[in-house]
Image: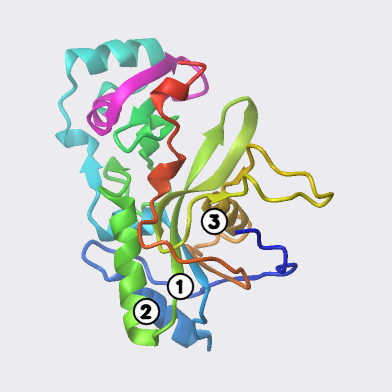
Amino acid sequence: MLMSDVDRINMFALPGIPAVRQGDDLGKLILGGLSRCGETMRDCDVLVVAQKIVSKAEGRVRLIADIEPSLKAIEVASASGKDPRKVQAILEESTDIVRAARVGVDGVVIARHRHGWVSANAGIDESNLGRDDGALLLLPDDPDLSARRIAETVTSATGVRLGVVITDTFGRPWRRGLVNVAIGLANLPAIIDLVGEADAYGRKLQVSQQAFADEIAAASGLLMLKDAGLPVVVVRGLRWTSDSAASARRYVRPLAEDLFK
């Protein structure tokens, strides 16, 4: 599917999303935000939702004081300079530690999350939690399922066909800085395979695969600023074919294809 007929999109953040607490229905909070700003969903709209509020709603919080570090955690903490209790939380969310180093103020632990993502600290975060009790926020247990639940709630109320992208900020190998990437999807294709399509000069593409949902996630980061309190963005104007089996895990490169392991 080559979307050559799309030359303009519109994005806007939903203001007034309240502080999210465990048990909140994010779909209903989003519908309330739409109502407050006088907007309604349209077919092919994409809701981009920050992982942080998803994890908060699902109660994915651990307290450092409740964590007992293992010998492995103490070993990795010694190599990285991190608190062993934080390292233990990382280990319990991961299948492998790729690298640990004493870099920056808190050290760096690059881990392969059990969902397949390779990222710093297995995606565990401490910022923007609104609490000072040593809380750690983990990634959602199943981000694709989280996205489907939001999509079902909003579609049930509005009747429109929409996509949902749950995002987190990841660093990038060999490049500085963070960008939003997709870690959970509903309906929206992760990848648009352009192999066999013609480029602008008629040449057939051989390997091109557009990371469609990741591109949407990255664009949403322009509005989801760390200090803005705007965890939901609507992207409008794209054309896409619904994928009932949509999953952000399609982005995970199999270990057999990892040239740097």
Spatial CA span between label 1 and label 3 = 27 Å
Which residue is under mark 3?
227
Q: Nearer the viewer, mark 3 or mark 2?
A: 2
Which amino acid is tagged 1?
Answer: Leu
Residue 166: percent from left, percent from top: 42, 56
Cβ–Cβ under 8 Å for marks 2 and 1: yes
Q: Residues within 10 Å of mark 3 (few under 14, many from 20)?
A: few
- Residue 103 drawn in magenta: yes
Which residue is under mark 2?
155
Q: Residue at x 52, y 49 (%)?
A: 191
- Viewer can see residue 28: no
Q: Please tell me whether mark 3 sits on a helix, a strand or a loop.
A: loop
- Viewer can see residue 239: yes
Where on the picture, by quarter, is residue 97?
top left
Compare residues 44 and 63 and report the one nearer the observer: 44
For the N terminus, the quadrant is: bottom right
Q: Residue at x 61, y 68 (%)?
A: 238
For the record, the magenta segment spans 86-110
Compare residues 200 and 50 and report the one nearer the observer: 200
Which residue is under mark 1?
162
